[in-house]
Image: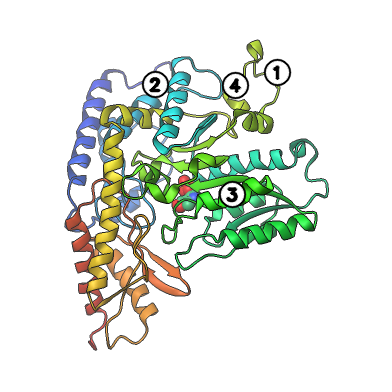
Amino acid sequence: MPGRLKLGARREEALQHAAGLVARAWHEFDHAREVEALPSPELIATLREPLPDDPGDVIEDLDLAAEVLDTSLAQARPRYLAYIGSSGLEVGALADLLAHSYDINLALDARAASYLDRQAIAWLAEFLGFPAGAGSFTSGGTISNITALAAARERALPGCRTTGMGGRRPRLYCSDEAHYSVTRAAELLGIGRENVRDIAIDELRRMDPVDLARQIDEDIAEGVTPIAVVATGGTTLTGAVDPIDAIADVCRDRGVWLHVDGAYGLPAAASASSGFRFAGLDRVDSLSVDAHKWLFVPKACSAVLVRRMSDLAATFSHDEAYIPHEDEQLNAVDITLEYSRPLRALKLWLAFRVHGAQAFRDAIDRNIGQARLMYDLASADPEFRTRAHPPQLSITPIQHVLPGCPDVDEHNAALCRAIQEDGRVYLSPAVIDGEIWLRPCFTNFRTTDDDVRETLAVAAELGRDLCPAH
Ligand SMILES: Cc1ncc(COP(=O)(O)O)c(C=O)c1O
């Protein structure tokens, strides 16, 4: 029957109701809630029901969806400090609703949306201080890294997209602190995981350019082809920023592609307090940055930017009967890995327009200040241990070290579980040099300095409870 997939007469009511649910969520996110709400057994039973054949009630089902979301781990909450989150920026959520309603496809030219997409890429490049020749929004840092490294591979071994590696020995270079997506790219691009060279790091956990130069030279002498160096602009574990300028010197002298994986940290290149750490960014060949991390917009919104459009075209352009090439113009699918692509750009574009770029620089600086506040408070507290150096960006690993608690690692693993069960704050653990640490990450514009203090207080309280011998 035609029209059964339309909301029809309930459309306005459904929209108003959804708006009310969103407003309630946003209001809640303004402050930390006392304790996490957990899914009820009834809700879990509902979520195990089989596929319905008959229609439900849109209002009731929207309420059910809201209940599921409300009892899920939401990164938008100000005390969600686990992993590296995004924070569901309000205008970003509105942009998603609009973009998904129009459901534009950026595989080919989409008229005005394609202009907007290119403008958002240009604004992002300007924000970061990178002279981009082209770029595209992708579903995440993983895909952005694979896209850039595919272009680097084609540049280092021209024609390999056609002929394969053909017995040639490729190699990638990054430190052990690089994100796993770099290894994944090596696996998928036929480079091979064993051909990812592990470059030494210094006491700040940053790549050592001297070791990098030595390893590349050794490889070149043995007839190996360097594909790319991947510097990390904010490592996932501790937020270390590799020395991009010095690494760019090494790459320039040897003609090797330099990619910066800044999925997490690169927005800090625009910040007043930490921009200096990214010196040399204007010299690199490509970069990845996740707007759905430290530019606060909802997932998924990553971007890969390259210096030269021709590198993407050499890697991805193709002719197919179903893809018109009018006037020899490149389509989006000629410079991207993905085919059907939603208008991810809209949320970043709208966010920059509505709030202005300075608001983003300020919010990033606030998060950096919060990481430093956590470091200073924990360092001054004899019950906590911090790293030897203050955070470079917005990740501050801490350990609870109570006299009388025999195994610090076991204690901190148990403490992390206790914090997650307690529900006032949400932290994740991390293993650093074989030790278990709590790892608060500050990438949420809603987090306040009070949230930082409360997080430490909760960790101390629950840590003492776990260690009655104290
Ligand atoms: C440095 C770095 N690169 C890549 C990624 C992967 O990004 P995504 O989860 O968006 O694929 C992450 C995720 O945390 C990251 O921190």
In front: mark 3 or mark 2? Answer: 3
Q: Residue at x 66, y 48 (%)?
A: 253
Q: Which is more N-terminal, label 2 or label 3?
A: 2
Q: Measuring 53% from the left and 18% from the top, which residue is drawn there? A: 109
Type of amino acid at the residue the image marks with label 2: Arg
**Residue pointed to by mark 1:** 321
- Mark 1 to mark 4 CA distance (whole Å): 13 Å
User: Could you tell me which secondary element the residue under label 2 belongs to?
Assistant: loop
Residue placed under numbered mark 4 in the picture: 331
Nearest the eye: 215 or 38: 215
Badge 1 element: loop
Is residue 343 at all visible to an observer of this figure?
no
Mark 4 vs mark 3, foreground winner is: 3
Q: Which residue position is annotated with label 3?
A: 249
Q: Position of residue 302 (x, y in %)?
A: 46, 39
Residue 82, located in which quarter of the rendered image? bottom left
- Figure check: 138 above or below 264: above
Q: Residue furthest right?
A: 167
Question: Alpha carbon of mark 3 to alpha carbon of mark 1: how far?
Answer: 44 Å
Can residue 16 be seen in this snapshot? Answer: yes
Q: Residue 130, position in %: x, y?
A: 48, 36
Q: Earlier in the sequence, mark 1 or mark 4?
A: 1
Res 85 label: none
- Crowding near pointer 3: few (<14 within 10 Å), some, many (20+)? some
Q: Amino acid at mark 4?
A: Asn
First-in-chain label (3 vs 1): 3
Dot label at residue 4 = 2
Q: Residues within 10 Å of mark 2 (few under 14, many from 20)?
A: few
